Amino acid sequence: MNQKKVILILFIITSLLFIFVTCNDDIFYTISLETPILEPMIKGSPTNFVLFPNAVDNADTKMYVASGRTLYNYKDNKWEKETLDKHIIQIAATENYLYALCFKDTDKAVVREVKRRSVTEPWAEVVIDADNYDFHTIYAAGQTIYIGAQKSKTNEFAVISITESGVSNIVYENENALLVGAAYNGSTYLCTRRGILIDGTMNSVLNQTFVGIINLPDNSIVAMSRSGNLYEVTTEIVTPAKTSFGDTRQATSAIAVWEDKLDTSKKLLLIGRGDLGYSPTSGFTHGYVELMLNETGGLILNANNLSYPFREPGPYDKDRDKDFPTQVVHSTVDNFRRYASSLGINPLNHLFQASDGIIFASTQRNGVWSYRDRNGTPQWNAETEPIR
C-alpha cells in the first residue's frame, strides 16, 4: 500500500472518530447524569395519595397511599403501615373518615366494596343503597364522598354520594359518565369522562374526554382533558381551553399542585403525560409537565385570556423553551436530563406534594417514587425511606 493511500485511510478514520465523538458528547453527558434506580419500598401499582384527617391545620394529618392490601402513611419523613383484609383500589378522605375502595372478593374482582375508618373507629363496610351497580372510583369533595359506579352489564354510569352519617344517594345517571375526579371550593364540581357535573347539570366539551380536576391554591378550579387541554371551571360554565400540551401529547390522571417551600410565591401545576409517539425534542414519552402559576396559585393569563404553555421540568433552556414567553421560570427539579432518565421514562397515575415539600409519584408498575436529596444529589428515584 503506497503512502498516499495510508494517509487517506488515516484521514478518513480520524474524521469518522471526530464525528462520532462530537456527536456523542451529548449522549455521554446524559449517561453521566443517570443514577442507579433503587428498589421501591412501596411496590407495584400504588393508589392515589390523600391527607387524613383532611382538615386545615390539623397536627395529626398524614399523607396516605396504598398498594395491594397495605395502607401506608407518611409524615415528617417517617412511614408507617397497616394491613386490610381486602385489596385496595383507591382511597379518599374527609375530615373524620378515611375511605378505601376495595375488591370485595378476589375471586370475582369486578365486585367492589367501600370501607372506612376514623381515628378511633376500626374499618367497617359502608352500606350503599345502589343495587346492581359496580363501584369503580371514589373521591371526596368537602365532607362528602362520591362514588363512580356502573350499572351491571350496561354502559350506564352513575355518581353516588355518601355523607359522613352514612346516607347514600344517586345524584346523576347517564351513559359514558364515569366519575374521574371531584373538587370543592364552597361549590361541588364532579368531573366525569363526559364532562363536569355542576349543581346536577352536565357541562361537556365537544370531543373531549376528561381525566381529572383540581383546586388551585387561589381556590379556582381547573380540569384536564385526555388530549392535554386545560379548562377553567366556574359555577356556571367550563371555559374554553386556557392552554394545551400540543398535538402529540396526552394527559394522565396524575394532577397536583407544587409549591417551593423556600419561596412560597413559586407555584406550579403538574400534569402527568404520555405521548402518542417518540418526541425528538425530549427523547422520552412519560413523566409530567409543569405549568407556571402566579404568586397566589392561579393561572397566569395574557391579553387573550390564555395561560402560559406547559413546559418540561428543569431550568430554563434556550432550545427547549424557545417558544416560552419568559426566561424567568421555576421548576420542581434542578436538572432536566437527570429527571428525563429517571421518572421521565415512567408512566404516572398520581402525583402529590407532602407537607414537608417532598413530591411523590405513583407509577403504573414501579411503585412509589419521590424527589429528594440522595447522596448530595436531588433526584427522582424510588422511595426507599424505611417504615418505622
Image (spheres, grey):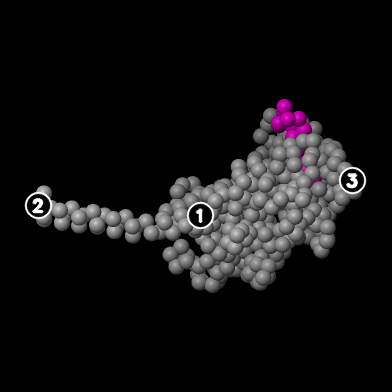
Kindly indicate whether the residue at mark 3 contacts the one at mark 1 (C-beta within 8 angstroms): no
Q: CA distance from mark 1 to mark 3?
A: 46 Å
Residue pointed to by mark 1: 34
Q: Which residues are magenta?
A: 99-114
Q: Which mark is residue 121?
A: 3
**Does residue 174 lie above or below 237 as drawn?**
above
Q: Amino acid at mark 1?
A: Glu
- In the displayed structure, does residue 241 sit left or right of residue 65? left
Mark 3: few, some, or many residues within 10 Å (few <14, many ≥20)?
few
Of the pair 373 and 101, the residue shown nearer to us: 373
In percent of width and height, residue 303 lies at: 55, 71
In percent of width and height, residue 158 lies at: 73, 40
User: Was residue 108 drawn as part of the magenta stretch in this picture?
Assistant: yes
Q: CA distance from mark 1 to mark 2?
A: 47 Å
Q: Amino acid at mark 3?
A: Glu
Tally of numbered discs? 3
- In the displayed structure, does residue 280 sit left or right of residue 325? left
Residue 61: image quadrant is bottom right
Query: Which residue is rendered at x = 64% and y = 47% of the image?
Result: 40
User: Was residue 175 drawn as part of the magenta stretch in this picture?
Assistant: no
Of the pair 251 and 240, the residue shown nearer to us: 251
Residue pointed to by mark 2: 2
Q: Nearer the viewer, mark 1 or mark 2?
A: 2
Q: CA distance from mark 2 to mark 3?
A: 92 Å
Tell me the SS state at disc 2.
loop
Q: Nearer the viewer, mark 1 or mark 3?
A: 1
Q: Amino acid at mark 2?
A: Asn
Q: In the displayed orientation, state which residue is furthest to the top.
A: 107
Q: Nearer the viewer, mark 2 or mark 3?
A: 2
Query: Which residue is rendered at x = 80% and y = 32% of the image?
Result: 131
Query: Which residue is rendered at x = 81% and y = 62% of the image?
Result: 56
